[in-house]
Image (cartoon, coloured by chain):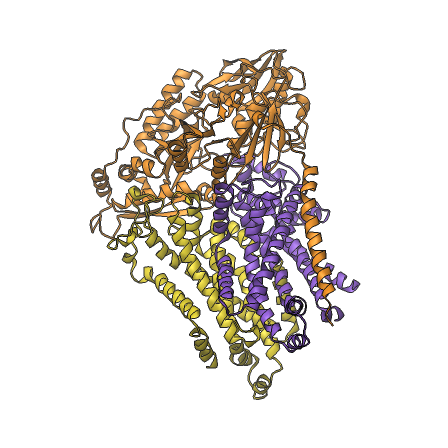
Amino acid sequence: MSRGILAFLARLVFVSFAVVTVVFLLQRLLPGSPADAVLGADALWSDKQRWLAAHGLDRPLHHQYSSYVQALVQGDFGVRWIDGRPVAPLIAQRFLETVRLAVCALMVSISCALFFGVVGALRAGTRSDRLLAVVSLFFISAPTFITGTIMLWIFSVWLDWLPLTGSQGWNSLILPAFVLGITLAAITGRMLRSSLIETLSQDYIRTAYSKGVSRLRVVGVHALRNALLPTTTLLGLQIGSLLSGAIITEQVFTWPGLGSLMMEAVSQRDYNLLSGCVVVLSVVQVCAAALVDVLHRQIDPRMART
Amino acid sequence: MFHFSWLRAFVGRLCLSFLLAVLLLPHFRALAAPSIQASLAETLRVGFETRPRSVDPRFVATDANSQYLEPLLHLPLVGFSESGEPQEIVAEKIQFTDPLTVVVKIRDGIRFAQGRSIDVDDVVATYKFVCFGALGLPPSPRRGAFERVKNIEKVSPSEMRLVLSEPDASLISNLTVGILPKEALSRKPDDLVGLGFESGPFLLKKAADDEWIIQRNGKYTGAPFGGMLPRVENVVFKILTDNNTRYAALLKGEIDLLQNSVDSDKVVEFQNRRAGEFEVQLKTSDSTAFLAFNFRHKLFQDVRVRRAIALAMNRAEILKFTLQGLGQEANSMFPPGHAFHFENKNSAEHNLREAELLLDLAGLKDSDGSAGPQPRATFNIKVPLNRERIAVAKAIAGQLKKVGLKVKVEVLEFNTFMKHLNNGNVQAWIAPWTGYKDGDHLHFVFHSKRTPPSGANRGFYSNAMLDELLDKAKSEASLEQRRRLYQEAQAIVSQELPYIFLWHRVGHVVHSRRVSGFRIFADGRYTSLTQVQVR
Amino acid sequence: MTLFKNMRHALLRDTVTKLSMLVVVLWLCVALLPHALPELLPLDIDLPKTRMAPQWNLSEPSGWFGYDSVGTSVFYQVLSGAGVSLSVGLCTVLLSFAIGIPLGALAGSGRRYFDVLITRLMDILLSFPPLVLPIALTALLGGGFLNVVVALTVSGWIGSAKLVRAEFRALDKREFVEAARALGATPRRVMFVHMLPHAASSLLVHASFSLAGVILAEAGLSFLGLGLGDEHPSWGASLSEARAYLLESPHLAIFPSLALLSLVLALNFLAESLRASLDPKAGSA
């Protein structure tokens, strides 16, 4: 087990380092001097030069890189350029919001996926299966910014059930979490359905039925457990989709999370902020994938032994 | 072989941890940022399109929202009257003793919220910071306005002196830096919250990414120069970046007031269909949209082509359909009512026949008639990614097609757009100027020495006569003389058409009927927040 | 040859699949329209028609779907948007395959050095959440057709590379490959003539899914303001503009959404049934 952890840590370090390097290189090549974005394009040239010098952006690229990495290792993401506030606590605060959204979306996703998958598999070929297929393919195919906006108008403005803005109460979470989760649910649900169908045709299921085990127990215990295996792998891959889906969902619902912080950084050409966001998002993705791997082993006893 | 228990335990554990996480997270958040408890009637909620970058007077940059909030918190030496003329606030009197020296007398009895009076030392220290910077702190983005200031010194307990290297008549309109107590100047950027450094009618209470809160300054002493004692206890600025959400939030009553941040067609909708719940105020604003040409592009070096384009455009039509009438046709830089407004008698009225004639004269013949597919000439207009500006550019392209000019609209992300502009990598573009105060703005935009990176003459326009007039006006002290010089300069601009002025935007405020007392100003300021009452 | 037989069987199996096939072919034809006959799609700007509602007047097709915010016909806009959206999608998928297949083949060819190198590269790219790298890249390169295609390709090639690599590793010890080697076929010939056709069916499924994905991703980028920035909008760009008029002029959103939905849905249906019949492991649908 400890060897596994070590390997994971090594991988994490390697990947984070590579991500930091890629992000660093990308950003130094962004068009538009950051001084333009911070001081305004109409500011004096001499001021822009002074500003660049003050932030060490006039030095050769490899100097900038080494000092950036050194600071990063010490947990210092630098300061947000427009107001000089340190980036790390900003990201931490926004990250918490994104986690809150993502966790709820995951809950929506898992419960809807179970519903889509189990009902679809048990009623395979019937009208309700086809209806579910169409519904889930609709959610896979529709851009979230449109479904999100439509739901926002229906539930927040027209019916006035849910608050429109802000992230204070639990009820402001419902809409964004649903919009974010349902797309994933549709994909996972399709996957679960086909693997459940496959499992249900296996011999041991027939054996279980012939022994007189109830249908609920057969499906809920015997079949689902095996069908969940490929699905959890998919879920691991989808943590990434969850995070990037959050970028768009947060824009639609003005959710103050990491995604909207990142878009802010893009529009303000704030290297420090953007790097911070991308690095954190990527590290989360790597960790989440590892976590799902662990989960996978939990469910599948064969994997645990290997 | 299989047991029910593992699934139950697994799902149970999963659900429990999710539940815990979801339930606990808001509490962590609540601990991190205590929100202000106030009854609704004492709070006005205003929607902002973007977060103010910084209201620290040392570091207030070019973004409008910061500039609107700053004078509500930190009183400056001068503010502006409604027509845009400088008006003394902390300064009692400002005088040019000679073209290179300005003497400022400080008003007595205006206090910071911490209790101490504003004295000359505070003013000198603040301006010294802005002009010359301080060790260990970033330079002030405002320095550009004080390029010609050579020295700042205290001359008596109530007077200071600014010494210039060259005459600069626009200096007085730049003395808008909010005054900070001298002990505040060594603090880190934006590290001024809750310390009583404010001297304005409001105190900054919270500056987060999703909302800003300002609170009534109970010890306000600046009245009547910098506004009255506010009637509301708190003003909350909610940062709502999405157009759609802002509009919906106002409809739903989650915010009470929006200024210049709903689309024109929504304003009309509020005016016509929701007049019972919402009040709309309109006023022509200090904002001028224009189509500009790059003089390095051969096509635009011929004034006949520029004039033909102006004639071929139908601005009234665009105003009516694209801006829903929320604009006033512009024929010069400054809107009517502005101190430097120029009445352009030479303005181009929509006339397709004359436009075609001019294009023929310029050697751009239309071989197959205006309906044929062969264009006379082709060029592109670059616009930043902004729905309205794209629509305007497309509309212009549609109109120019009628005289045989083929226009391609190229949409760029904002930073890329600015980069293309400053590199001269552009043929024609559409943009507005906003927030100008002084006639000196023309120097910044049209003087041949102010090409990027040292100015905003991004079309590389050059006219020796205009340069001379603008230089003269910059060094002239008398307001009368300056007005005359800028009139002459603008007459040249109106002949030469380096810009085709499109319109002055009509600014708008939409607020719910619960709110009374808010007044709209041409420059979009929020000073009337002090008068607002919420039912 | 069996592949094509299987494919024909798969594509003509049931009504939904046939219908999806029809939709995709139809949109492909529409996408080619502006290149063949540009005068058929008059994208004129006519301000007095700004946001006019649809009028079902048979003789005037430009008014069928109403007019957009500069008075251009939404009907023609949707038709020309098909070309834009599909060409972004097809170019990205083709470019991804052009990069992904050789790299995947190299990684699966049994040479450890290449395998480790390429797998590490994929690991790095996969650790960015899907849309994050394209966002950063389009912000870096600016919008525009080529840049969006490049940005979406950078993480898009991984799917096909992984597929090919897995397939090749599985095939490596099969008899027919050994036989080909024994008969003196060069490694390159073995890879591309003998092994690649076996990956073709799963690549086809992958192409169909990823075409749908790319079209959606482009719509997302357009919504974030990082799209093509072209004068003639893709469906995604039309939609992100229509969002502002959802209440007053829903026709601006409805028709491009229907178009986008129909194509993406059809591609997804197609991919699912292709997978079901070409790949017996995936279970019956």
Would residue A272 be visible to someone looking at this image? yes
A246 relative position to B484: left or right: right
Q: Position of residue B340 (x, y in %)?
A: 39, 22
Residue C203 image offset from top left, x and y in percent: 51, 71
Up/down of B398 relative to B346, above or below: below
Q: Position of residue B405 (x, y in %)?
A: 28, 46
- Residue B19 coordinates in the image, percent (x, y): 68, 50
* Residue drawn at the location 42% of the way across and 43% of the way down: C247
Give the orange chain's letter.
B
The residue at the point 59 percent across, 56 percent down is A109
| Location of residue A38 by image quarter | top right
* The hue in which chain C appears in the rendered picture of the protein: yellow
Horizontal side of B11 relative to C262 (left or right) equals: right
Front residue of C177 and A186:
A186
* Up-down relation of residue C77 to residue B329 (above or below): below
Shown colour of chain A: purple
Residue A121 as seen in the image, left or right of residue B309: right
Going by the picture, which residue comes out furthest to the bottom? C183
The answer to which of B494 and B1 lies nearer the viewer is: B1
Query: Vertical placement of B139 versus A264: above or below?
Result: above
